[in-house]
């Protein structure tokens, strides 16, 4: 199992809608997350900076392949068409990077 953390900014005008839609994530999106070997997926919001912090545990053998599978899913693509305009990459994100990875510096079971 691999723990993954990512960060992105949420546009201030989108906060209420982002919270609303994530209170009822589409079943097809949740099914794709599970099919891609992701468990314990959480997204946290830090205000007033409007930072989204995502954490999940990857239980598969090929993260790159599973992320490509997720990106190809039509329901997930429709979901991202709604959520992506609500977000903006960190100013320090690498070119082409949407959610910026965060390095794990400590973990205790």
Image: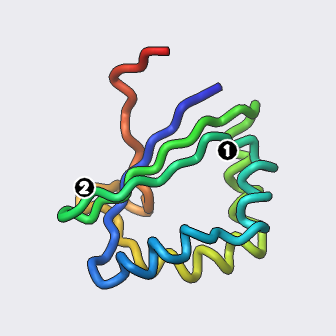
Which mark, by number, is residue 39? Answer: none
Q: Residue at x 49, y 15 (%)?
A: 109
Image position of 73 (left or right of 85): right
Q: Which residue is mark 2?
A: 92
Image quadrant occupied by the N terminus = top right
Disc 1/disc 2 C-alpha distance (Å):
23 Å
Rendering coords of residue 4 (x, y %):
51, 38
The residue shown at (75%, 31%) is 61
Q: Vertical placement of 3 versus 49: above or below?
A: above
Q: In front: 20, or 2?
A: 20
Note whether 99 is above or below 36 in the view shown. Answer: below
The residue carrying pointer 2 sits among few (fewer than 14), some (14 to 19) or many (20 or more) residues within 10 Å by Cα, namely few
**What residue appears at the point 30 percent right and 84 percent down from the top-left corner?**
13
Q: Quadrant of residue 48?
A: bottom left
Residue 54 point in image, percent of width and height = 46, 50
**Secondary structure of residue under mark 2:** loop
Residue 11 lies in quadrant: bottom left
Residue 75 in percent (x, y) is at 75, 74
Q: Identify the residue position indicated by label 1 in the image.
A: 64
Q: Nearer the viewer, residue 91 or 104?
A: 104
The local crowd at label 1, few if under 14, some if 14 to 19, many if 20 or more residues have their Cα within 10 Å, is few
Residue 39 spot, x, y in % from top left:
67, 41
Along the horizontal axis of the image, is 85 left or right of 8?
Answer: right
In the picture shown, does residue 28 fall above or below 33?
A: below
- Asked if disc 1 and disc 2 are in contact, CB closer than 8 Å, the reply is no
Query: Which residue is pictured at 43% across the width and 57% down the height?
Result: 99
* Above or below: residue 67 compared with residue 5: below
Between discs 1 and 2, the one toward the N terminus: 1
Q: Name the foreground residue: 58 vs 63.
A: 58
Give the residue furthest to the top: 109
């Amino acid at each position: 199992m691999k723990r993954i953390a990512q960060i992105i900014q949420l546009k201030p005008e989108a906060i209420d809608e982002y919270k609303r839609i994530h209170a009822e994530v589409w079943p097809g999106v949740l099914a794709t997350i599970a099919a891609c070997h992701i468990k314990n997926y959480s997204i946290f919001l830090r205000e007033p900076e409007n930072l989204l912090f995502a954490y999940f545990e990857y239980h598969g053998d090929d993260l790159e392949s599973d992320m490509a599978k997720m990106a190809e899913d039509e329901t997930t693509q429709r979901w991202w068409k709604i959520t992506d305009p609500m977000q903006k990459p960190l100013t320090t994100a690498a070119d082409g990077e949407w959610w910026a990875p965060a390095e794990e510096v400590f973990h205790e079971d």
